[in-house]
Image (cartoon, rainbow, N blue to C red):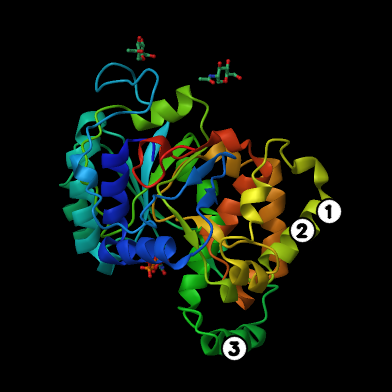
């Protein structure tokens, strides 16, 4: 993402889900035969590595450290922006959270001291608070999610939900029967930025339990985003399980038909609707490539989520019910909204430093 260059990017990617991310990457790059071009949301085309995109033989750690171009603010050089490190986490994920915090503090935050904001659908335990607080010099806040933001909305039919979960499970959609997973996806899609604790905060960096950050980041990443007018930073995009979002794109088209004014003239619809790389995905998802920014890592400007366009879009999706009758994830929802309603030049991937994607 922003923070970096090949080295940082790859380390973060590798760390995001450790070996599983690696496998997914490997799968993505090696499974597609024929085409050697992929589309990036900023509209550029990137050529796959000559060897077919295998990770073999590429050691990102040997590449020299470079930052993104432009002025980078070192620790102490400028005031902090209105930003927070943000985690939705359960009490029983304390160990994973501590390890993620240690990495984040060691590589970045001990130099900048951005506050941490922890969210939970139930109160944090004394142990959780005590032990997480010890990992940072920065301010730490523990917030309970209001019931109105978390509970399954009144217009959702529990019977229909249970039936749908059966069908989704048959189709192999992970977590279909886990109600809280649906609630988590909905909250991450359209609710978190409305929490009163974030009222005066513009930027967040999502940190999930058990993620790793290996690379030192010596400049203020949030300020970089702000100075360069970026809305969203990501490290990787991957294909979703089309079975989990069969009506997401049709619902989106319905919304656009009602609100053509929200489409940004410099949007990334070609990336969203690409059917060359994964024709079957596009087909099963009814016109959406299913390619999405993996939201386990994201740095974003909440001004975008708080805009009228996004709010109307989220409300439309929420009414349609797919967070519960299907298993719409926050990642495809965020990605589609950014791809349609935001200037694609404001979506930031430090791809030019990545050895995977030598420039065209
Ligand atoms: N407090 C709370 N946090 C949750 C709940 N469900 C998920 N989370 C958090 O939300 C984040 C994502 O949840 P995961 O279950 O890991 O979802 P995921 O990342 O799609 O799943 P995997 O990649 O398969 O691990 C994690 O940080 C969890 O701690 C919940 O019911 N309550
Ligand atoms: C930080 O903010 C304070 C108070 O607003 C201001 O006086 C100071 O000049 C700022 N420092 C920098 C380095 O911008
Ligand atoms: C960011 O946007 C502002 C306001 O539109 C503009 O003045 C500035 O030049 C932009 N900065 C960059 C780096 O594009």
The residue sitting at 68% across, 43% down in the picture is 341
Callout 3–callout 1 Cβ contact below 8 Å: no
Q: Distance between the residues labelled 3 and 2?
A: 24 Å
| Residue named by callout 3 | 167
The residue sitting at 81% across, 48% down in the picture is 259
The residue sitting at 26% across, 21% down in the picture is 74
Callout 1–callout 2 Cβ contact below 8 Å: yes
Residue 253's disc is 2
Q: Is residue 255 left or right of residue 104?
A: right
Q: Is the shortest distance between ligand 1 and the CB of mark 3 under 8 Å?
A: no
Above/below status of 228 relative to 281: above
Residue 257's disc is 1
- In depth, the one of 180 and 255 nearer the eye is 255
Q: Provide the secondary structure element on which disc 1 rests.
A: helix
Where on the picture, by quarter, is residue 60?
top left
Comes first in the chain, label 3 or label 1: 3
- In depth, the one of 226 and 234 nearer the eye is 234
Residue 142: horizontal and vertical position, in percent? 34, 51
Residue 167: horizontal and vertical position, in percent? 59, 88
Q: In this view, does 131 lie to the left or right of 70?
A: left
- In depth, the one of 82 and 291 nearer the eye is 291
Q: In this view, does 104 lie to the left or right of 156?
A: left
Q: Provide the secondary structure element on which disc 2 rests.
A: helix
């Amino acid at each position: 993402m922003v923070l970096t260059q090949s080295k940082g990017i790859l380390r973060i990617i590798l760390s995001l889900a450790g070996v599983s991310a690696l496998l997914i990457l490997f799968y993505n790059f090696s499974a597609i035969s024929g085409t050697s071009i992929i589309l990036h949301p900023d509209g550029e085309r990137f050529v796959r590595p000559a060897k077919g995109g295998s990770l073999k033989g590429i050691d990102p750690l040997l590449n020299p450290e470079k930052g993104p171009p432009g002025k980078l603010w070192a620790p102490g050089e400028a005031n902090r922006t209105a930003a927070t490190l943000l985690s939705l986490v359960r009490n029983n994920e304390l160990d994973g959270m501590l390890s993620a915090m240690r990495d984040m503090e060691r590589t970045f935050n001990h130099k900048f001291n951005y506050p941490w904001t922890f969210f939970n659908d139930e109160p944090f335990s004394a142990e959780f608070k005590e032990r997480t607080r010890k990992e940072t010099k920065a301010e730490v806040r523990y917030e309970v999610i209001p019931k109105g933001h978390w509970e399954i909305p009144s217009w959702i039919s529990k019977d229909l939900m249970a039936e749908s979960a059966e069908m989704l499970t048959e189709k192999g959609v992970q977590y279909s029967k886990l109600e809280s997973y649906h609630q988590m996806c909905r909250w991450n899609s359209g609710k978190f930025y409305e929490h009163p604790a974030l009222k005066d905060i513009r930027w967040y960096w999502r940190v999930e339990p058990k993620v790793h950050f290996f690379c030192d980041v010596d400049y203020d990443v949030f300020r970089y985003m702000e100075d360069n007018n970026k809305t969203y930073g990501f490290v990787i995009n991957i294909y979703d399980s089309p079975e989990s979002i069969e009506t997401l794109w049709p619902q989106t088209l319905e919304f656009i038909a009602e609100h053509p004014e929200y489409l940004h003239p410099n949007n990334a619809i070609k990336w969203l609707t690409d059917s060359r790389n994964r024709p079957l995905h596009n087909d099963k998802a009814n016109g959406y490539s299913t390619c999405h920014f993996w939201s386990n890592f994201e740095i974003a400007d909440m001004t975008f989520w708080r805009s009228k366009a996004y709010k109307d879009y989220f409300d439309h999706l929420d009414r349609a019910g797919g967070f519960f009758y299907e298993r719409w994830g926050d990642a495809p929802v965020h990605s589609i909204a950014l791809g349609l309603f935001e200037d694609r030049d404001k979506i930031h991937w430090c791809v030019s430093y990545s050895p995977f994607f030598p420039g065209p």
